[in-house]
Amino acid sequence: MNKEISKLVSRAKEHDADAFMQLVQPYTKKLYQTALSILVNDEDAADAIQETILNCWEKIHTLKESQYFYTWMTRILINNCYDICKKRARYVEMQDYEEPAVYDQYNLELKEALLFLDEKYRLPMMLFYGEGYSIKEIANLLEIPISTVQTRLSRGRIRLAKYYAADL
């Protein structure tokens, strides 16, 4: 797998669009979930992903180690999501958001519960439980200390437990 990614990254660095799309394609669903966990809005998440793919294409030559392509792309996505948050600086009520167009019924309740959390808890939880990142990787992606990630995961779990307890 790493050899295949390395070959695709090398080809993408030589401006091979097909190779670049082969790199990005397997990660689009995960990127969408990450963007949605930050932006909580389907259209903004789609914009962030589109901007991320464009940024990655333009800056693929800056990727130093090809095995970290997905991590590198996720960091760019997170930065783009934060930029969108800054641009829309106005407060929008949770009920004003549209329900994502595509979702699976199985995880709908969990997604609604995660929307209850502040973004600082929601993002680490999505990255840890949804994407399978380790605490150390999350700390690197979010550029925060490992202990902060651990605290946010713990507090996020406590808040989710309270949310479910209140729901009963």
Image (spheres, grey):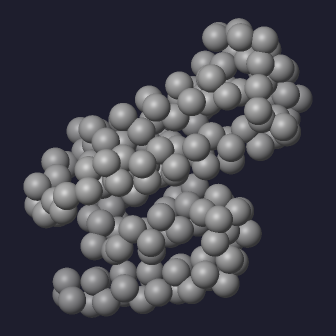
Image point (63%, 23%), residue name: 58
Image point (57%, 86%), residue name: 151
- The image shows residue 82, relative to residue 102, as above or below, that is below
- The image shows residue 158, relative to residue 15, as above or below, that is below
Rendering quarter of residue 108:
bottom left
Q: Is residue 130 left or right of residue 3?
A: left
Number of disc labels: 0
The answer to whether any part of residue 145 appears in the image is yes
Rendering quarter of residue 5:
top right
In this view of the protein, which residue sits in the foreground, 135 or 139? Answer: 139
Coordinates of residue 12 in the picture (x, y in percent)? 73, 17
Quarter of the image containing the N terminus?
top right
Farthest right residue in view: 3
Q: Is residue 122 left or right of residue 28?
A: left
Q: Is residue 16 left or right of residue 104?
A: right
Coordinates of residue 38 in the picture (x, y in percent)? 40, 57
Quarter of the image containing the C terminus?
bottom left
- The image shows residue 146, relative to residue 109, as above or below, that is below
The answer to whether any part of residue 1 appears in the image is no
Rendering quarter of residue 46:
top left
Image point (61%, 49%), residue name: 75
In this view of the protein, which residue sits in the foreground, 106 or 126? Answer: 126
Coordinates of residue 131 in the picture (x, y in percent)? 58, 55
Image point (17%, 52%), residue name: 97
